[in-house]
Amino acid sequence: MYKLILITLFLAGTLAGQTLSVASPGNILQVTFTLEDGAPSYQVLRFGREVIRPSRLGFMLKQAPHFDRGFSLVSSDKKSVDETWIQPWGEKKDIRNHYRELRVDLAGSGKPARKMTLVFRVFDDGVGFRYEIPEQPGLNHFEIMDELSEFSFTGDHTAWWIPAYQWNRYEYLYSRTPLSAIDTVHTPLTLETANGLHLSIHEAALTDYASMTLARIDSFRLKADLVPWSDGVKVKTAAPMKTPWRTIQIADNPGDLITAYLILNLNEPNKLGDVSWVKPGKYVGIWWEMHLNTATWGSGEKHGATTENAKRYIDFAAKYGFDGVLVEGWNLGWDGDWIKNGDKFNFLTPYDDFDIKEVTRYAAEKGVRLIGHHETGGGIANYERQMGDAFAMYERLGVKAVKTGYVRHGREIERLDENGQVQLEWHHGQYMVRHYRKAVIEAAKHHIMIDAHEPIKDTGIRRTYPNMMTREGARGQEFNAWGENHGNPPEHTTILPFTRLLGGPMDFTPGIFDLLFEEARPDNRVNTTLTKQLALYVVLYSPLHMAADLPENYEARPEPFQFIRDVPTDWEDTRVLNASIGNYLTVVRKDRNSADWYLGSISDAEGRVLHAPLNFLAPGQTYLAEIYRDGPSGNWQDNPYDVEIVKMLVDNAATLTLRLAAGGGQAIRFTPATEADLERYGSATE
Ligand code: NOJ
């Protein structure tokens, strides 16, 4: 009987088609490629168990419908790679790129024969695959009408997602539902199986292609749904071409999704050469007051971007050691409905009350830099006309970083077509993917770093263009000032690191100290304790972090402000100590420029007791731990300001008990103890 089954299986295997398999270096994951009746598909196994069931591959092209069947196997090739590369800046310095690759060359039987190559890279913690369409007769320029890649899951997993094709781009609260309840969603999409496996579906190296959303086509089956151009075409391209990588991260622990570097590894190495001019840092700016509506972007009595106000922020930045001062609303174009009048922005001319030369001169004198701002309002033609000159002007003025903005509703980005007619595009279609890249490359020519708001999602291109520092691309702090339903609920930041930030850094703009701002915006508030605002600097990775509140609110609370002054934004290493999506997260990071470690721990609306073993600290070294924690009566709702600051000596054998209030957090700086510390704090640990 046993033999019979084996024979039947063997026959089924051969009759069903040709299969090729490749396993990850540690033999944890395996990808199987199958060509059945000329149709390609793939499957992913972990320890021999299915994680992705056989799933379709291919395209519908305008010039060749059904680029998904009639193929035969021409050749295949395997290779192994194990290399370590250094990030010029980042959340971790040394990145190991360790995978096995399978390339499969396919050809059709028609004349001319269609050619397509599939490349699979299998890491121990995930899989990337991409299509290559080589040069071939009869397929020069072509249009992709649909990408057929599917992700067929094994059950009704729990899913964390935001909807695609909505007016507010990526700025939605995450929903947690069964997989079977989703419609069409953005990536990264995070899933948890009934067996406790954690998955993230995303893409890497999104270049000159449409971004991939995921549409549910069957109970547990998702399909790539490429964001179309206004004429319905998904991608306009020419052979030879390569698609972005489709990525599947797989981990036991949700924290391991955060410390996986597959997305970066699938991007091309640095193309900019010497990037010593790219520098992580912290900034303050004329920003929050506009969101509180106590100042305006546009001209008039309440205009925020005045020379005088900018100097006030520069003085503050210089006094407390910040690198940059962002000034929004400095240039002509903000008067009237700026969200609709993207064509009116002038990126070269300041308002009369903002003397940009004087401001940049004053900043330089104080050792601080102006951070530039280009809000485009989605008027892309207008911006692209001025972009080169605008970056050149900033370069002349000593500006090293520019925040860009694309506030326009989804599918309302204005593109001028060949006939000078306005066509309306999505933020996430190929037209905008091209634009966002153009801006990064143009900025690099002027040695300028980019912080993009309303961006294209992050797919790891910071590896290739290290001046692409950070971006928004989710509901950030600003929603607490004016968002409906009183802003972001406490759990929001316990979901972001497991979803949006799996793509890359986020300019969340933490650090609000006046959490209630009852006079300015009585219906809103920040729904955290003050300590949680500190912890966000460590938990939410960004190479450029803002101290988002007003100078006076920091000066009113100098003790907790010290943590924001101390915390770095460039790390040698990152580890996750405890993680539960939507509940809590503890992250520790080692400063790249000192021996210091930092810990950030946050909770949702529940109070938590978490344990932090300090075995990441250097052995044999005593550290001073400066602990910023929620006080005994602290909680986000009634008493968000109850902060306790405690100093104690610790070493790597200690385990700290972290008590996080409801909606609270904890932030710790560990520095090698000095003689004076040893004397002052003795050897007592808590
Ligand atoms: C939305 C951005 O997220 C915000 O930071 C900025 O202040 C406004 N747009 C204006 O550009």
Image (cartoon, helix red, strand yellow):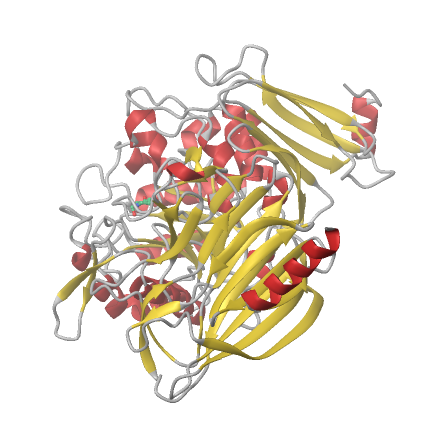
- Using residue 28 as the reference point, say whether residue 278 is left or right of it: left
Residue at figure coordinates x 12%, y 74% from the top left? 419
Q: Nearer the viewer, residue 685 or 503?
A: 503
Residue 417 appears in the figure: yes
Instruction: Work out whether residue 163 or residue 59 is closer to the camera in this orientation and state it.
Output: 59
Q: Is residue 403 above or below residue 391?
A: above
**In screen coordinates, is 332 left or right of 571?**
left
Height in image: 240 above or below 440?
below
Residue 586 point in image, percent of width and height: 62, 33
Check the picture and name the quadrant holding the C terminus. Answer: top right
Q: Position of residue 276 (x, y in %)?
A: 58, 65
Residue 609 image point, x, y percent: 64, 20
Left or right side of 598 for 57: left
Q: Is residue 366 visible?
A: no
Measured from the top left, where is residue 169 in percent x and y?
A: 31, 47
199 or 256: which is nearer to us?
A: 199
Q: Residue at x 44, y 41 (%)?
A: 508
The quadrant holding residue 355 is bottom left
Number of numbered discs on residues: 0
Indicate the quadrant of ligand 1 in the picture: top left
